[in-house]
Image (cartoon, rainbow, N blue to C red):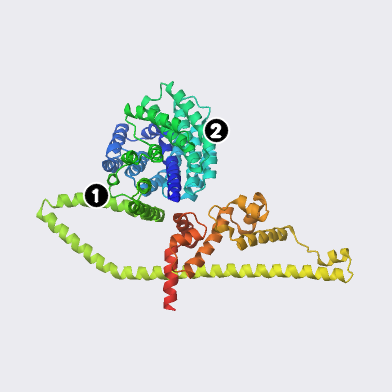
Amino acid sequence: MQKLIKTALLLVFAFAILGCKSKELSSGDDTSASIASSGGNQAYYSAVVETFKTQPSEALSLIEKGESTGMLSWVQAHELKYRAYSKLGYDSQALLALNEFTSDPAFNQLPEKVQLQFLLDKVKSNIKLSRYDVALDEAHGLVRRARNLGDPVLLADVDMQISAIYAFQNLPKDSREYSNFAYERLKSANVGKDLMSLSSVISTSLDNCIYTKTYTRCDWLLDEWKSAITKLRTRNEVPAEQVDEQEAAYLAKAAYIYQVEGRHGDAEKSYQLFKELEANTSISSPDEIVRYLMGKGDYKEALKLIPTLESYGVDTVRMGYVNNLADRARIALNTGDTLRAIKYHMRSDDLKDSISVRNIAAATIEAESLLGYEKQTEELARSQKTVRSQQLALGLAAGVLVVLLALIPFYIITIRNIRKRNEFAAQQIDDQVLYTQKLAKVRAELEEANARTEIMEMKYEEKGGTESAIKESLAPRTSEDEENIRQFVAMDKILEDKKLYLDPDFNRAQLEAETGVQRDLASKLIKSNTGYNFAVYVNEKRLKHSVELLRDYNNYTIEAVALDSGFGEVRSFYRVFREKFGMTPTAYRETVMRKGTTN
């Protein structure tokens, strides 16, 4: 259960960075004005913008009509498509529209700040689709351009997205470093919108502190947040309801943090102030209030504040639903309903695996299917009005059946090709493991040879050889590169002998403690000898270990293999394994088992 709570806190922290920044750190006014004035009919553009706020599906039809009739310019149409797909939750379709939009020469004619805001949206879309490497490269490119522009709010937003990437990859220290960068850029803010951005950055930094349990820093950040909110109260350009939202979030986090610190009086005072503010406004209860009530033991009240599972509808494969299940599991456990707690916990784990396996291709198919289904439903409703339409529908169904029957041989061939591809990939994996084992054997033989050389030196001395003669005859004449290799081999051997990489929390500090090699030198040795950075180097060893477990221990679950190989989470194991070998751990095991049965 502690692991479940820690995972839930991390996910809340990462999605807090990703979800709330776009509204508070990005200024949409300049963007809308620039797009609206980029040709086309400005009144029609404004009408579509108002439509997609409440009816995004209808907005898509208006966009297509506007583009075909010239009422919308190319820039306006593609920008609106991106916004409509985002509103509908079709993340893959939104990213495709955004890629088309930003790759066209017309995009480069927009003001630099507007370009950067759309490119930042690309970073956020790639994060949503778990394309962290692409998102990180794009974010670092934006840092340079935003720095040249001299916009601290935009720079802070980029920093927070980089922080989100590291948070999703379970690297809280790196994530905190970039959230600190964002705070430093905005800490002197006095303008209303900049103070709102600062407030948002502090809120997310507090989420990091809660996850890493650095409560001393939490107290300091709470004081900074309170000061920022006090300034906001004096700025007439910020609506009062927005300031109320910030203060409510501040009081909710303060109640939870004070409770964890044992300051129950301060926690209760913050909670009561939150309740007073909630009674006079339309704000909703944040997650911290739910956690505060659970920590207080008021599980009945906490359960009231958690959205019902039915409110999510059929779309349960998302993190809000997973976090909901985690809270319900904890409440059930603490109220003695162990079976229900186990049920929620298992469902939460299953959904996290499902979310981690989804990729951009699957999401695109899902979005296209949803759009196609809506159009087919409308067409069917109209066709039922006439006999002719009914006959047409019947003919269409017959045609689909014929197509499906015709596709059966193709499906069979495709399955066979997939199996052959997996068998080939599995053989490559086995060959790579075998090569690594042979390389380790050669290294061991080299060390044995070095040991024999030392023995020869000792015997030479016993027979009267002089020290200078020994040095002249036996001293190794190694170049700088050879010394580099020797140090790396020695360090790598310690790592392999002690299996240090099987610890999910293994880091550069532990490597230095175990091997005596300083962190910077260790990173250089790893880079020059393997071409990898530290994280990839450790994951390579973990992957090798996981392959051996998958091949030799059929009774191990995928989760057990992941944990025994040093991966903290199953979804991280899936992602790294697929990126390295082009297939999932499950597919590799099935291929190896099938090959063994055939042989």
The kind of residue tagged 1 is Glu
Picture layout, residue 324 above or below residue 265: below
User: Outermost residue toward the front?
Assistant: 336
Q: Is residue 302 or residue 149 the one in the foreground?
A: 302
> Could you tell me which quadrant the C terminus lies in?
bottom left
Q: Is residue 322 visible?
A: no
User: Outermost residue toward the left?
Assistant: 387
Q: Is residue 483 visible?
A: yes
**Image spot of residue 446 (x, y percent):** 70, 68
Q: Are marks 2 and 1 in contact (CB under 8 Å)?
A: no
Picture layout, residue 373 above or below residue 444: above
**Image spot of residue 530 (x, y percent):** 61, 59
**Image spot of residue 171 (x, y percent):** 52, 47
Give the mark nearer the N terminus: 2 vs 1: 2
**Pointer 2 residue:** 184
Measured in 3D between alpha carbons, the distance from the residue under mark 2 to the one under mark 1, in whole angstroms, is: 48 Å
Q: Which mark is residue 374?
A: 1
Locate residue 184 relative to residue 8 in the image: left or right: right
**Image spot of residue 78 (x, y percent):** 36, 42
Q: Is residue 67 or residue 399 the one in the foreground?
A: 399
Q: Is residue 552 or residue 424 the one in the foreground?
A: 552
The kind of residue tagged 2 is Glu
